[in-house]
Image (spheres, rainbow, N blue to C red):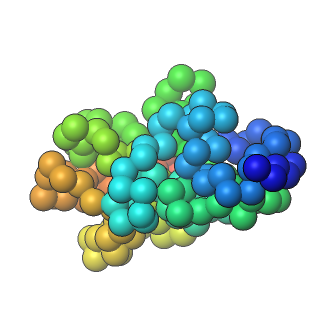
Amino acid sequence: MAKRLLQVTVNGQRREDAVAEHTLLLEYLREQLGLTGTKRGCDGGECGACTVLVDGQPRLSCITLACGCEGREVSTIESLTRRGRLSALQRAFHEKLGTQCGFCTPGMIMAAEALLLREPHPSEDQIREALAGNICRCTGYVKIIESVQAAALAIADLAGEAT
């Protein structure tokens, strides 16, 4: 197995690790770095449970090679918690019951995080579009959408914006 040196920033930490060239980003995060918040779902890029951000854009880590992230910034669900406190988005998912079994939640939250980074006041249609690649097998998505809307309002309130 040929290995190469991967230089990548993960959750704000610059890293340099030897990885096999065929290692998936999901495997690198979970097995090599111990970041198990990113979930292994379908292994085919169909469910979105493994969604992470690469340079602020949602990426399915189960179909992305780790080496393809050379020199990039990778953010996982673990990056959202600050000093042991949930982010506004994580808190909204908890308070608005956006989770059921919780398996899809990290991927949903990361897809929603990417949306809120580029569009702080998304419409319901924009939320639905941003989450279209993420499958929840437990709900009808109503509470998930309400969670993203609540997070957007909370973030706006924190920023002192008028709604």
Position in image of residue 117 (x %, y %): 54, 62
**In the displayed structure, would residue 100 be above or below residue 72?**
above
- Toward which corner of the image does residue 100 lie, by quadrant? top left
**In the displayed structure, would residue 134 be above or below residue 138?**
below
Q: Nearer the viewer, residue 30 or 125?
A: 30
Q: With 6 as the anchor, is 25 left or right in this view?
A: left
Position in image of residue 142 (x %, y %): 16, 58
Q: Nearer the viewer, residue 54 or 50?
A: 50
Residue 8 appears in the picture as rendered: no
Question: Residue at the spot x=46%, y=32% of the render?
Answer: 86
Residue lying at the far front in this picture: please name it: 1
Quadrant the C terminus occupies:
bottom left
Position in image of residue 66 (x %, y %): 68, 55
Question: Residue at the spot x=48%, y=69% of the render?
Answer: 119
Q: With 74 as the anchor, is 42 left or right in this view?
A: left
Question: Residue at the spot x=34%, y=60% of the render?
Answer: 47
Q: With 56 as the anchor, is 154 left or right in this view?
A: left
Q: Nearer the viewer, residue 40 or 74?
A: 40
Q: With 43 as the anchor, is 148 left or right in this view?
A: left
Residue 115 appears in the picture as rendered: yes
